[in-house]
Image (cartoon, grey):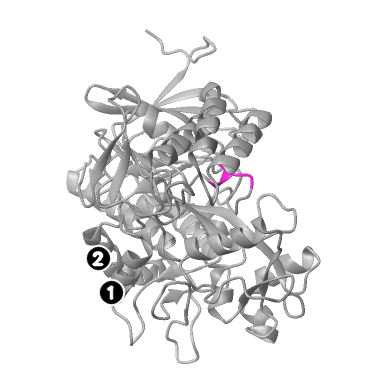
């Protein structure tokens, strides 16, 4: 029988010729390049090199490469920030791999910032005990890494890059993954494969205030959930304390590295909002939120430190601020917390395996156990490159057949979004109100009722699952603060949401593997 699309028209069927990687950010492209010469198809919902959070990352890659640093210290800082939900073995493995990740990225062509003697220039960010943040072009690390990996992917013959190709469903049988449904402007395609990597990024676009691309709305979580994969700790959202509050959506980010160079947080009276502006992000975000709720404004004051060196160190931030009418050398910058990073995700092991055979996840969409309840600054790009490569190395060990990846169909062009703008806007408002920096039972229960009829599209489904998880976690931990449950629960436990059609959610001891 000829497969047919939902509209009833015949659906094209194409053999992928290898794994299909959904997402063309750092995790997805690192996996594709590492997999060579084995073939793969990389799907990008938009144009390659756009629409991914990687390219927006101002912070750097954390790696213990300084003479006073080591992986053990990096591990300890990560676990301390993670508020009891980190998997210590996972943290140790990824932080130990960090120096080699820097070497690999350099070999791919990444131009990291260096001192006069050629050594890496290292920055300091919140909750790090050492200078270990490796930057590129000051505050443009993500853009440089994305440029590097796009160039590397384009020059690799085994990688087939499909632009404007939106994955809408992971196809499965009783044996596991069997393919991916892909929507293109020219019609629906069934891309057949038994191996899929989700590298779709985060969920910031579900919130009214976010530093993420607005297209980052948890599509990967929806794909995984509907395919039967377990989600873990998806209530854990990191709100970055210093999003530039000038009426732009999404909000421009003011990197934590600015505070690493001495900038402070003050209110309109010049009073400090928090004594230590380099505290863990959840701590700083709550302090700012308290000031905002009390009727104050919050500003990042960099006039003294870094002062006149601001443009030298943070050229793109300075340009963005001036376009909005603020000179960071002479004026404090208005800031507020904004949804920035998702610590939760699809539960995976260090090879990226989910509990659906053939389905893998890497990067922000995955929950490896590295970030716990609160991500340590600049560990996200690190996780993306390390875990993306580890998944590809695992595929090599499986002995996948070598062949040719399916060529991208001709004439690909922008795809019409799946959910109406009005529906997404409604979800953003509901999720922001109920599951922002501070949460409580009444708000979460009301939000669930409002989101229930919106679950037919990805944003509504993921918003509903996130709010449901936030309601079920009756404690305050890391990025999740319940005003009605202000204390930590003992012992710390993961919160699991099994895939669609499976028994309802459960909890899991720290360190357990699916």
Mark 1 / mark 2, whichever is N-terminal: 1
Give the numbered dot on residue 71: 1
Q: Position of residue 327 (x, y in %)?
A: 77, 74
Q: Looking at the rendering, in which quadrant would you find the N terminus?
A: top left
| Crowd class of label 1 (few under 14; some 14 to 19; many from 20; radius 10 Å) | many
Residue occupying image coordinates x 27% and y 35%? 358
Q: Residue at x 67, y 63 (%)?
A: 335
At which x and y percent is residue 314?
63, 75
Query: Does 294 lie within the magenta span?
Result: no
Residue 440 rendering spot, x and y as whole percentages: 50, 43
| Image mark count | 2
Is residue 46 visible to us here?
no
Residue 344: in sight, yes or no?
yes
Residue drawn at 49 percent across, 13 percent down: 10
Q: Nearer the viewer, residue 34 or 137?
A: 137
- 118 vs 204, left or right, is left
Quarter of the image where the C terminus is located:
top left
Residue 206 magenta-highlighted: yes
Vertical side of 142 occupied by 233: above or below: above
Label 1 to label 2: alpha-carbon separation: 7 Å
In this rendering, position of residue 180 left or right of residue 390: right
Residue found at the very far right of the displayed protein = 325
- Dominant SS in magenta: helix
Q: Mark 2 points at which residue?
A: 92
Q: Do the residues labelled 1 and 2 touch (CB within 8 Å)?
A: yes
Q: What element carries label 1?
A: helix
Instruction: Give SS at disc 2.
Output: helix
Q: What stretch is highlighted in magenta?
A: 204-208
Q: Say the numbered circle drawn on residue 422.
A: none
State the residue lying farthest toward the bottom.
Answer: 117
User: Dot 2, how many residues are within 10 Å of its Cα: few (below 14), some (14-19), or many (20+)?
Assistant: some
Give 389 or 154, whichever is nearer the viewer: 389
């Amino acid at each position: 029988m000829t497969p047919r699309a939902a509209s009833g028209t015949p659906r094209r069927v194409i053999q992928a010729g290898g794994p299909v990687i959904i997402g063309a950010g750092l995790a997805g492209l690192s996996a594709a390049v590492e997999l060579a010469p084995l073939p793969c198809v990389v799907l990008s919902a938009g144009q390659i090199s756009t629409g991914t959070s990687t390219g927006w990352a101002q912070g750097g890659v954390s790696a213990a490469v300084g003479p006073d640093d080591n992986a053990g210290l990096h591990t300890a800082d990560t676990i301390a920030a993670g508020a009891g939900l980190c998997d210590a073995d996972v943290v140790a493995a990824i932080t130990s791999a960090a120096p080699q990740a820097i070497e690999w990225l350099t070999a791919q062509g990444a131009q990291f910032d260096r001192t006069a003697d050629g050594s890496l220039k290292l920055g300091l960010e919140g909750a790090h005990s050492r200078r270990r943040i490796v930057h590129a072009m000051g505050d443009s690390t993500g853009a440089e890494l994305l440029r590097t990996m796009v160039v590397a992917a384009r020059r690799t013959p085994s990688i087939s890059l499909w632009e404007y190709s939106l994955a809408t469903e992971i196809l499965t049988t009783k044996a596991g993954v069997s393919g991916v449904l892909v929507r293109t402007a020219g019609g629906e395609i069934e891309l057949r494969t038994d191996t899929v990597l989700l590298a779709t990024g985060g969920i910031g676009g579900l919130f009214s205030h976010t530093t993420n691309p607005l297209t980052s709305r948890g599509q990967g979580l929806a794909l995984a959930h509907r395919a039967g994969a377990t989600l873990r700790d998806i209530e854990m959202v990191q709100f970055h304390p210093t999003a530039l509050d000038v009426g732009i959506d999404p909000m421009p980010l003011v990197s934590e590295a600015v505070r690493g160079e001495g900038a402070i947080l003050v209110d309109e009276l010049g009073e400090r909002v928090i004594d230590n502006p380099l505290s863990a992000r959840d701590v700083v975000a709550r302090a700012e939120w308290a000031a905002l709720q009390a009727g104050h404004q919050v500003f990042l004051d960099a006039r003294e430190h870094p002062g006149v060196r601001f443009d030298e160190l943070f050229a793109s931030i300075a340009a963005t601020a001036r376009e909005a009418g603020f000179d960071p050398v002479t004026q404090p910058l208005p800031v507020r917390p904004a949804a920035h990073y998702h610590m939760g995700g699809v539960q995976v092991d260090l090879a990226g395996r989910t509990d659906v055979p053939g389905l893998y996840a890497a990067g922000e969409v995955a929950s490896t156990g590295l970030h716990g309840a609160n991500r340590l600054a600049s560990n996200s790009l690190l996780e993306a490159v390390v875990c993306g490569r580890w998944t590809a190395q695992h595929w090599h060990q499986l002995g996948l057949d070598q062949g040719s990846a399916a060529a991208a169909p001709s004439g690909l062009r922008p795809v019409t979004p799946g959910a109406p703008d009005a529906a997404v806007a409604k979800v953003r408002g509901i999720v922001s109100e109920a599951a922002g920096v501070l949460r409580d039972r009444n708000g979460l229960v009301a939000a669930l009722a409002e989101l229930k009829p919106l679950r037919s599209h990805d944003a509504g489904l993921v918003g509903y699952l996130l709010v449901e998880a936030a309601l079920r976690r009756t404690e305050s931990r890391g990025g999740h603060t319940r005003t009605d449950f202000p204390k930590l629960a003992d012992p710390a436990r993961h919160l699991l949401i099994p895939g669609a059609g499976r028994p309802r959610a459960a909890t899991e001891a720290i360190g357990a593997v699916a």
